[in-house]
Amino acid sequence: MNITILGTGKVGHTIGTKLIQLGHNVIMGSRTSTNEKANAWVKVNGVNSSQSTFSKAAKFGEIIFNCTSGMASLEALKLAGGENMKGKILIDVANPLDFSKGMPPTLSVCNDDSLGEQIQRTFPDVKVVKALNTVNCNLMVNPSMLKGEHDLFMCGNDASAKSKVLEILQSWFGWKSVIDLGDITNARAMEMLLPIWVRLYGKFQSTNFNYKIVR
């Protein structure tokens, strides 16, 4: 499958590398076609990897991962172009974390809105599914790093898109427990888990942890 990664940070590199290992063709998109981080990733991952601008990358992929910084996601997706993403599944991994006042970061949008909803409103012809934003990038693609059972959350408006994303999470990445919270408004709750996630990171001095819902 042809898959697009938007964003050149650690999250994009980790997800992109996993997808290459699974045999997919992966393109990494950024503002320019000569991004140094993207070039370095391509050199490591070989012939099934490539890099280009946001727009060309978005046009290439059948499925798109938004791995851009949450504060810049809307701008990046506008550069990717609504026509290039029309009808496609966009897995939104980003969180609207605002580091302008230092640590711990705040959320630039919360309570009555979310980044996931903003993306869906801006691109109504894109099938936005929020997922993977509540764990670190290594756990995203390898949940077995943690012992025992633990949960991942997802939400989105399109049932068929969520079904495909569930397949990706379970069959490709190895998640055993994925909780579908419902429509895209539930991205508010998923993104608002980040303040406690950041504080747990400060407490444990490690990002290798996750949530387990017991009932």
Image: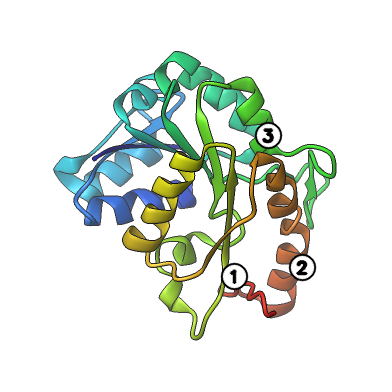
Which residue type carries mark 2? Arg
Which residue type carries mark 3? Glu
Dot label at residue 117: 3
Q: Which of disc 2 and disc 3 is earlier in sequence?
A: 3
Dot label at residue 207: 1
Looking at the image, which residue is at 61% across and 59% down?
134
Given contact means CB atoms under 8 Å apart, are the residues at marks 3 and 2 in contact? Answer: no
Which residue type carries mark 1? Thr
Quadrant holding the N terminus: top left
Quadrant holding the C terminus: bottom right
Q: How crowded is mark 3: few (under 14 residues within 10 Å), some or many (20 or more)?
A: many
Residue 112, horizontal then vertical, whole percent: 84, 39
Q: Name the residue under label 2.
A: 199
Q: Considering the numbered disc 1 on the image, is that residue within a helix, a strand or a loop?
A: loop
When asked about the image quadrant of residue 37, the answer is top left
Given contact means CB atoms under 8 Å apart, are the residues at marks 2 and 1 in contact? Answer: no
Q: Is residue 130 above or below residue 145?
A: above
Looking at the image, which residue is at 51% across and 85% down?
148
Q: Considering the numbered disc 2 on the image, is that residue within a helix, a strand or a loop?
A: helix
Looking at the image, which residue is at 62% across and 29% down?
119
Residue 167, horizontal then vertical, whole percent: 37, 54
Residue 19, horizontal then vertical, whole percent: 30, 51
